Amino acid sequence: QVQLVESGGGLVQPGGSLRLSCAASGITFRLYTMGWYRQAPGKQREFLASMTSGGSTNYAESVKGRFTISRDNAKNTVYLQMNSLKPEDAAVYLCNANFPLSRANYWGQGTQVTISS
């Protein structure tokens, strides 16, 4: 049974930082491309960042330079370091695991990030 469990969300002031974590189980984590997405109320799910099994990263323009994705294969965990947070960054943040060229694609339940002064 595959599980992706996000944590680290919460309330932060504009300009602040948060570090999200996503712990995976039930998959061979080191072989998966791991990604972060977010979804705000009334909006479509938005891609933020991904990291392949080989360590290549990709970022959305909206977060490039502010967010950093990393992974620890020994801990089966992917992280998203978020700096210089803006009110428009408020959303539910979701973790994704994808095995390239297959139908294996899994989602976590999400963690809420609220930006408010």
Image (cartoon, rainbow, N blue to C red):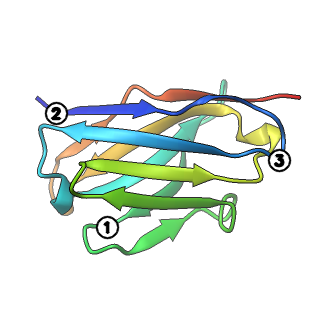
Left or right, 97 with respect to 46, comes to: left
- Numbered badge on residue 52: 1
Q: Splitting the image into 4 quarters, where does residue 33 fall?
A: bottom left
Alpha-carbon neighbours of circle 2 within 10 Å: few (<14), some, or many (≥20)? few
Secondary element under disc 2, as helix, strand or loop, is loop
| Residue at 21% across, 56% down | 74
Residue 114: x percent and y percent?
71, 28
Alpha-carbon neighbours of circle 1 within 10 Å: few (<14), some, or many (≥20)? some
- Numbered badge on residue 15: 3
Residue 59: x percent and y percent?
55, 65
| Residue at 50% across, 58% down | 49
Labels 3 and 1: the sequence-earlier one: 3
- Residue type of the residue flagged with mark 3: Gly
Circle nearer the viewer, 3 or 1: 3
**Callout 3–callout 1 Cβ contact below 8 Å:** no
Secondary element under disc 1, as helix, strand or loop, is loop
Labels 1 and 2: the sequence-earlier one: 2
Residue 104: x percent and y percent?
17, 47
- Residue type of the residue flagged with mark 1: Thr
- What residue is shown with label 2? 2
Query: How far separated are the C-alphas under marks 3 and 1?
Result: 29 Å
Residue 107: x percent and y percent?
33, 36
